[in-house]
Image (cartoon, rainbow, N blue to C red):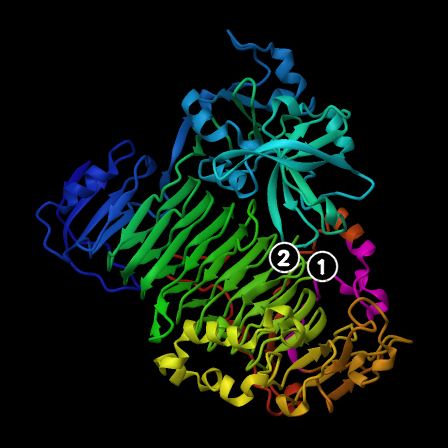
């Protein structure tokens, strides 16, 4: 390492000051020792830089900064050229052809070759896994229970690029467990919380398994493990004595075998068939890789085995981390900011890691970073305090999240928002089996984000998801939101989410509803555009009939304690609608979707009868507690011949199915909605610059555009991989003199051009 006195690099976004020192760290140098050297003679708060030279820096111990380290900058000498990796690192030249024989090996060349497909046999490379690394990271993987596999699975990257572990089926296809495939149950030992335990688990037929050597594998499956379409997890896969086409697993719910139960099988040498795929063999303890075209002898291969954070800021303030690539990281987040303030992570790339950045404290920022191929979530954003209305002021801005939640259960989002008064803005999020965002806590803000191609596997979920009464004052505005084919909604305010404002969003390419409100109150849905969805808004009155809300007094006491309502806190004063809840409704507190407002929303070419409707069980919501006005339904070419739309108010023509049967009462939200119809010869032109063609047609898996989902059609679509056409941004700006503003004079144009990523010092091009 070298030490120089100089001036800190200037940035366009944040103020800079003169440095006291600059320490340059070369690959192989001890970063911790370099940091200690940088601190020598440094005055408190004095600005100085720890500069990482180009190359790969292996981190063996967490780099820790504390309250006395304010003003320190950790940056790449050349943005994107310094890589931080953890674990086992080797060069491409260290790998040998998988078809070669190894002296002293218990297995001959042909034994290993036999497990690799003939088409790629001569293209695969292999390397021995060091004994200590195999024992601590690879061994016993399949015996772990559920999340244990997901936390322990090794991550391989080559030159900072994620290499997917071998899997079948390929692409977005899934293997579906049917009742015919389920054979029975068997007792198997698994490891739960580090302790062995015997449990009853199912075994089932998989025709493909005839070609798998499960006895010598640490194979596992990942997918929806029960009848609920959002309960994703992992289970070990084992050979069975019941036949070559039968497999046993160590976690599954055999009682709920239906169209939700679908999987991908992982870590099978026999399924390496695409460049970049790899697997490890349990008996020979070798890692086998089918390298892609960019692989060379000089390539740097990294296997993530380091669980602790790369960088930890505990109580630190005004620290900056800039331009570094973080890769090959298991366990916790790469960077953890805990209870500090004014810290910034800018222009960094997180590729092939389990989790990206965890933020708490006040006024911290994650800006213009790329998060790619994450096994779990990108940023966890917390900070702020509810009762005192202390706003966290933490921000995620101008960040790209691509392919996240690859191998994780629920809540493996691009961003998880906790706390009070935090913000996510101008981000792009796409490529996930589940949610893009999970929002928890009051007065948070999500704005100007573009989200698409998420909820690929999860049903009963949403691109933006919030749960519970805790979101009072949260605003979701000016976002362009979509999902994937299936039963997920755009914005899902689940299980009595209350007090949220949904304003000025474009909800399109949504497989289910644009907005789904599950019994919540004090919600405003205003000035949104719904198009390319099956339904616009759906709400239900679950608060009136769920067992969870029968003990009204206990429920209210829990809410009061959380927000400090009884003490008349700052929060109670800021949100009198919540604070007055019990006084207004008394002991007969209505915990259903009351006092909500649905104003000036445009429903454009929505095919389903569910354009905007309320599902009731035994009890309707009084009109005096619902405001629905200024909304307009537009069928640009009119209705299809013979079709009926619930917007006309004819509820007698709603099909009888599980959501509109005898036990439910369904009615339109809008008693006097405006309907504007065109014809095929004279379609309605509302004046948008360019309405994008939807990426998929929801009528492909709904009954005659009017009924509930046809699960057989949806399953068939998914079995084929349900690949979407490329996402078309379009342009939902309004041209001068747009007809929409004449038909809906209270509708305010959405600032479409401002949605998504923008250029700055760190993001010089927009992907």
Relative side of 395 to 717, left or right: left
Residue 180, position as x, y percentages in the image: 83, 41
Residue 246, position as x, y percentages in the image: 75, 30
Q: Residue at x 42, y 40 (%)?
A: 329
Q: Nearer the viewer, residue 201 or 17?
A: 201
Q: Secondary structure at mark 2?
A: loop
Q: Secondary structure at mark 1?
A: loop
Q: Residue at x 40, y 48 (%)?
A: 333
> Callout 1: few (<14), some (14-19), or many (20+) C-alpha neighbours within 10 Å?
many
Q: Is residue 706 magenta?
A: yes
Q: Cα distance, mark 2 to mark 1?
A: 8 Å
Disc number for residue 424? none
Residue 661, position as x, y percentages in the image: 82, 71
Residue 601, position as x, y percentages in the image: 64, 82
Depicted 499 relative to depicted 363: above or below: below
Depicted 364 relative to depicted 269: above or below: below
Disc number for residue 486? 1
Relative side of 317 to 494, left or right: left
Residues shaded magenta: 687-714
Q: Which residue is mark 2?
A: 455
Look at the numbered discs 2 and 1 and tell me whether their residues touch, using CB distance below 8 Å: yes
Depicted 60 relative to depicted 395: above or below: above
Most extreme residue toward the left is 41
Depicted 112 relative to depicted 626: above or below: above
Q: Nearer the viewer, residue 751 or 721?
A: 721
State whether residue 325 appears in this view. Answer: yes
Most extreme residue toward the right is 642
Relative side of 512 to 336, left or right: right
């Amino acid at each position: 390492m070298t030490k120089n006195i100089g001036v800190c690099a200037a940035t366009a976004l944040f103020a800079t000051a003169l440095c006291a020192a600059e320490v340059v760290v070369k690959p192989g140098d001890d970063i911790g020792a370099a940091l200690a050297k940088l601190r020598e003679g440094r005055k408190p708060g004095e600005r100085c830089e720890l500069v990482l030279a180009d190359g790969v820096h292996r981190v063996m111990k967490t780099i820790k900064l504390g309250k006395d380290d304010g003003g320190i900058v950790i940056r790449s000498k050349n943005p994107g050229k310094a890589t931080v990796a953890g674990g086992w690192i080797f060069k491409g030249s260290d790998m040998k052809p998988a078809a070669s024989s190894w002296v002293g090996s218990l297995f001959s060349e042909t034994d290993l070759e036999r497990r690799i497909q003939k088409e790629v046999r001569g293209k695969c490379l292999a390397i021995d896994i060091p004994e200590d690394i195999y024992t601590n990271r690879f061994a016993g993987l399949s015996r772990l229970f559920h999340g244990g596999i997901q936390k322990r699975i090794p991550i391989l990257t080559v030159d900072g690029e994620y290499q997917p572990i071998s899997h079948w089926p390929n692409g977005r296809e899934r293997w579906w467990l049917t009742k015919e495939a389920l054979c029975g149950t068997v007792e198997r030992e698994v490891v739960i919380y580090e302790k062995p335990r015997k449990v009853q688990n199912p075994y089932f037929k998989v025709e493909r398994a005839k070609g798998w050597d499960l006895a010598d594998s640490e194979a596992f499956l990942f997918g929806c493990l029960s009848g609920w379409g959002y309960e994703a997890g992992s289970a070990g896969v084992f050979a069975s004595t019941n036949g070559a086409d039968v497999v046993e697993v160590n976690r599954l719910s055999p009682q709920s075998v239906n169209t939700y139960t679908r999987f991908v099988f992982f870590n099978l040498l026999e399924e390496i068939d695409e460049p970049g795929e790899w697997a490890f063999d349990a008996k020979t303890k070798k890692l086998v890789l089918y390298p892609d075209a960019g692989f060379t002898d000089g390539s740097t291969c990294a296997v993530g085995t380091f669980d602790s954070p790369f960088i930890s800021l505990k109580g630190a303030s005004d620290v900056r981390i800039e331009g570094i690539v973080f890769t090959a990281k298991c366990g916790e987040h790469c960077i953890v900011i805990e209870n500090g303030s004014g810290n910034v992570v800018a222009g960094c790339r997180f590729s092939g890691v389990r989790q990206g950045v965890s933020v708490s404290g006040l006024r911290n920022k994650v800006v213009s970073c790329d998060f790619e191929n994450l096994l779990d979530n990108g940023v966890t954003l917390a900070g702020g305090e509810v009762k005192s209305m202390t706003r966290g002021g933490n921000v995620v801005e101008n960040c790209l999240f691509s392919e996240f939640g690859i191998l994780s259960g629920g809540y493996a989002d691009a961003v998880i928002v906790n706390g009070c008064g935090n913000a996510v803005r101008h981000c792009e999020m796409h490529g996930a089996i589940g949610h893009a965002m999970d929002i928890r806590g009051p007065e948070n803000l999500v704005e100007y984000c573009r989200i698409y191609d998420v909820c690929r596997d999860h049903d009963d979920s949403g691109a933006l998801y919030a749960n519970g009464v805790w979101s009072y004052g949260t605003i979701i505005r000016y976002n362009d939101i979509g999902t994937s084919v299936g039963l997920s909604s755009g914005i899902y305010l689940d299980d009595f989410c209350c007090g949220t404002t949904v304003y000025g969003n474009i909800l399109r390419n949504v497989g289910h509803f644009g907005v789904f409100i599950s019994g919540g109150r004090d919600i405003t849905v205003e000035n949104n555009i719904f198009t390319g969805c099956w339904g616009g808004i759906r709400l239900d009155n679950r608060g009136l009939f769920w067992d969870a809300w029968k003990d009204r007094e206990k429920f209210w006491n829990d809410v009061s304690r959380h927000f400090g309502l009884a003490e008349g806190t700052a929060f109670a004063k800021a949100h009198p609608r919540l604070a007055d809840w019990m006084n207004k409704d008394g002991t007969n507190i209505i915990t259903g979707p009351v006092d909500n407002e649905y104003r000036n929303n445009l429903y454009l070419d929505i095919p389903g009868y569910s354009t905007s409707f309320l599902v009731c069980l035994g009890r309707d919501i009084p009109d005096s507690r619902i405001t629905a006005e200024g909304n307009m339904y537009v069928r640009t070419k009119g209705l299809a011949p013979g079709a009926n739309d619930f917007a006309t108010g004819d509820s007698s023509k709603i099909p009888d199915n599980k959501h509109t049967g005898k036990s439910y009462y369904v009615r339109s939200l809008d008693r006097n909605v405006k309907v504007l119809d065109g014809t095929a010869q004279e379609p309605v032109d509302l004046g948008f610059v360019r309405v994008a063609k939807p990426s998929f047609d929801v009528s492909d898996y709904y009954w005659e555009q009017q009924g509930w989902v046809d699960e057989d059609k949806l399953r068939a679509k998914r079995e084929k991989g349900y690949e979407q056409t490329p996402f078309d941004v379009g342009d939902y700006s309004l041209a001068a003199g747009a007809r929409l503003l004449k038909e809906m004079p209270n509708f305010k144009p959405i600032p479409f051009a401002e949605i998504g990523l923008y250029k700055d010092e760190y993001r010089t091009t927009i992907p």
